[in-house]
């Protein structure tokens, strides 16, 4: 028999095309971190990560890291070992700093503060769980921003970081790429991250199996969480963009809707979001298109028009530029993975992950 030949009669398996997950999260666990919010966040990712319930990291992927690449202990006494060496630049969509006991987060190492500042400058969103907000505060990343805190930490936080606004009635706050969560289960936060990257269906799957009632859409301001920008006009412009994703109206119309001129809106957008309003609106349209590709059977042209693109060719051009593949291939590869996973067959992941 030639090397590589398959003996007659043996079972063979169809392997799904290799795909990259829509949501990648790097957890950096500090010693004595609080287990519950970390567990709520990662279990929500786990349910969203495949179509069945085999905990495969297909559509969501996560890694555990520590500051010294060695095992640490959660505040409850549970030992945790990292799954990868510390590398916060490994193409993660979010870096999560998980804190807990204040003794471990009041005085973080300078090199960690420098790394977090660099991540923020590069536009990588950072999530602080529990007392990790003290780490971001010391890095200066919460100056002029709102920060969701546990009520027991508010007084000390306000004394240490008076340039930040302490919030104690939200389960999380997203303020210009810095997301703070006071603790609890972090399931509200997880659901909105999943909804944003993977669509409503996967977000609801996690909520249902974690026995949590459905929450409001990420675009709504709720008692549980809030996404804010320091400039109120920029926030209103973003809300207007979200409400008109299917429209081909110009940025001049957006500026007029929020009571300013296009040049002023451009300056304020760059100052608050680090990108021009045209780019931001296109990003919102493409994210919406990706959700439609996964969660509906609408054809490419219909989705293009529903997301404000003038035609399918323009949509395909930008989709390929941002995501590295055509909308057709994006949908085909994910549906094939879902089909094989649902039937219990082997599935593929990108070996470069």
Image (spheres, rainbow, N blue to C red):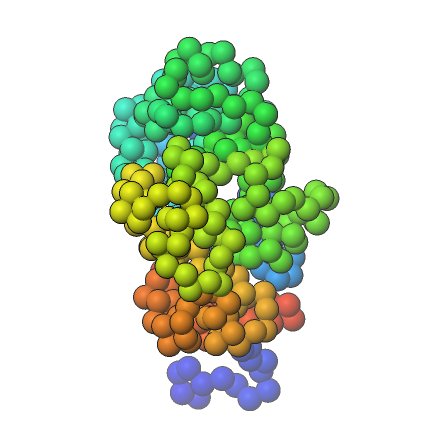
Q: Is residue 34 left or right of residue 112?
A: right
Residue 157: percent from the left, percent from the top? 45, 16
Viewer-proximal residue, 199 or 49? 199
Residue 129: percent from the left, percent from the top? 49, 31
Viewer-proximal residue, 37 or 2? 37
Q: Is residue 98 left or right of residue 344?
A: left
Viewer-proximal residue, 210 or 124? 124
Task: Work out whether residue 247 can be spotted.
Answer: yes
> Which of the image's four quarters has the C terminus?
bottom left
Q: Residue at x 48, y 21 (%)?
A: 166
Q: Residue at x 58, y 59 (%)?
A: 50
Above or below: residue 38 compared with residue 163: below
Residue 137: percent from the left, percent from the top? 38, 23
> Which of the image's four quarters has the N terminus?
bottom left
Q: Residue at x 51, y 67 (%)?
A: 306
Task: Work out whether residue 326 can be spotted.
Answer: no
């Amino acid at each position: 028999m030639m090397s590589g030949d398959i003996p007659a009669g043996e079972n063979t398996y169809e392997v799904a095309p290799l795909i990259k997950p829509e949501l990648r999260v790097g957890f950096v666990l500090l010693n004595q971190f609080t287990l519950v919010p970390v567990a709520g966040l990662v279990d929500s990712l786990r349910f969203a990560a495949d179509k069945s319930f085999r905990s495969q990291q297909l559509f969501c992927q996560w890694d555990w890291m520590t500051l010294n690449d060695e095992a640490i202990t959660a505040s409850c006494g549970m030992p945790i070992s990292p799954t990868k060496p510390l590398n916060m630049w490994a193409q993660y969509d979010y870096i999560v700093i998980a804190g807990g006991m204040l003794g471990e987060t009041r005085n973080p190492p300078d090199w960690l503060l420098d790394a977090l500042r660099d991540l923020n400058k590069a536009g990588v969103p950072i999530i602080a769980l529990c007392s990790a907000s003290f780490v971001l505060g010391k890095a200066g990343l919460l100056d002029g921003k709102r920060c969701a805190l546990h009520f027991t930490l508010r007084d000390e936080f306000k004394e240490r970081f008076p340039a930040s606004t302490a919030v104690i009635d939200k389960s999380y706050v997203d303020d210009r790429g810095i997301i703070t969560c006071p603790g609890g289960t972090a399931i509200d936060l997880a659901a909105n991250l999943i909804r944003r990257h993977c669509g409503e269906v996967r977000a609801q799957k996690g909520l249902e199996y974690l026995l949590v009632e459905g929450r409001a859409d990420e675009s709504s301001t709720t008692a549980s969480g809030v996404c804010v920008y320091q400039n109120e006009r920029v926030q209103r412009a973003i809300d207007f963009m979200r409400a008109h994703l299917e429209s081909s109206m110009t940025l001049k119309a957006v500026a007029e809707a929020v009571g300013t001129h296009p040049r002023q809106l451009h300056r304020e957008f760059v100052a608050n979001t680090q990108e021009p309003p045209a780019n931001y609106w296109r990003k919102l349209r493409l994210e919406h298109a990706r959700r439609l590709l996964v969660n509906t059977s609408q054809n490419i042209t219909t989705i293009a028009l529903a997301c404000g693109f003038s035609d399918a060719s323009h949509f395909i051009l930008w989709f390929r530029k941002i995501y590295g593949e055509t909308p057709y291939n994006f949908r085909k590869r994910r549906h094939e993975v879902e089909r094989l996973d649902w039937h219990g067959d082997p599935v593929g992941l990108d070996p470069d992950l």
